Image: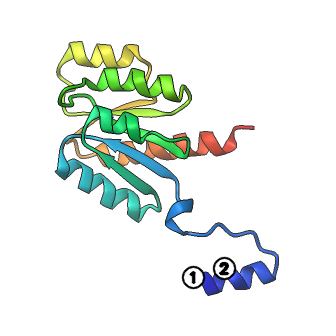
Amino acid sequence: MNRFNELLKKFNYKTRSLEKSNLPKILIIDDSLNIQQALKRTLIQKNHDVILESTGKGGIDALTRDIFVVILDVKLPKMDGTDVYLKLKEINPGIPIIFYSAYPGDKKIVKKCFSLKPYAFIEKGVAQDIDSLYQSIERAFLKKIIKP
């Protein structure tokens, strides 16, 4: 791939290197290792760099300016996902945060999440969850690169 990019540069083609550091970064904050790994596999196949954190504090500490979207579990140990959301927004108010929850039936949790106005709220475990999640990620990415 590097040789191909070198040839394109000789002919003045603008290319984006597919090195890991140049891929769009997604921060996943979820205490389930199975969910983390499944999302990571899917997103890496779609040319995204993935950072995994299993605690709210770890996710807050991992947030950097080059992360363009956060996937956040609602139920986390020690720190509720909605509290993590508020801290992440303090650090970077413009960061798109997608709640990814296995608790859509808990109306109190859902109401609290929606009151924060997340970028999206996706239910875990339904057949369309990965598709819905990826569509939300793509919309966030396009919105970010189109901004003037």
- Residue 100 in view here: no
Give x and y (percent) for residue 8: 73, 80
Q: Which mark is residue 5?
A: 2
Mark 2 packing: few (<14 Cα in 10 Å), some, or many (20+)?
Answer: some
Can you see residue 33? Answer: yes
| Badge 2 vs badge 1, beta-carbon distance below 8 Å | yes
In-front residue for pair 21/47: 21
Residue sitting at x 47%, y 41%: 69
Kindly indicate the quadrant of the structure image that contains residue 113: top left
From the viewer's side, name the closer residue of 44 and 125.
44
* Residue positioned 49% across, 65% down in the render: 20
Instruction: Between residue 144 and residue 94, name the one nearer to us.
Output: 94
User: Where is 33 relative to 63, above or below?
Assistant: below
Disc 2 is placed on an element classified as helix
Q: What quarter of the picture does the C terminus occupy?
A: top right
- Its colouring scheme is rainbow
x, y percent for residue 42: 34, 58
Q: Residue under label 1, please give it.
A: 1
Label 2, label 1: how far apart the Cα atoms are: 6 Å
| Left or right: residue 127 compared with residue 63 | left
Amino acid residing under circle 1: Met
x then y, percent, for residue 74: 26, 28
Answer with left or right where residue 34 lies relative to residue 16. left
Image coordinates for residue 87, horizontal then vertical, percent: 41, 23
What residue is rendered at 50% in x and 41% in y?
A: 64
Position of 25 compared to 15: left or right? left
Circle 1 SS class: loop
Residue at x 25%, y 55% (from the top left corner): 38
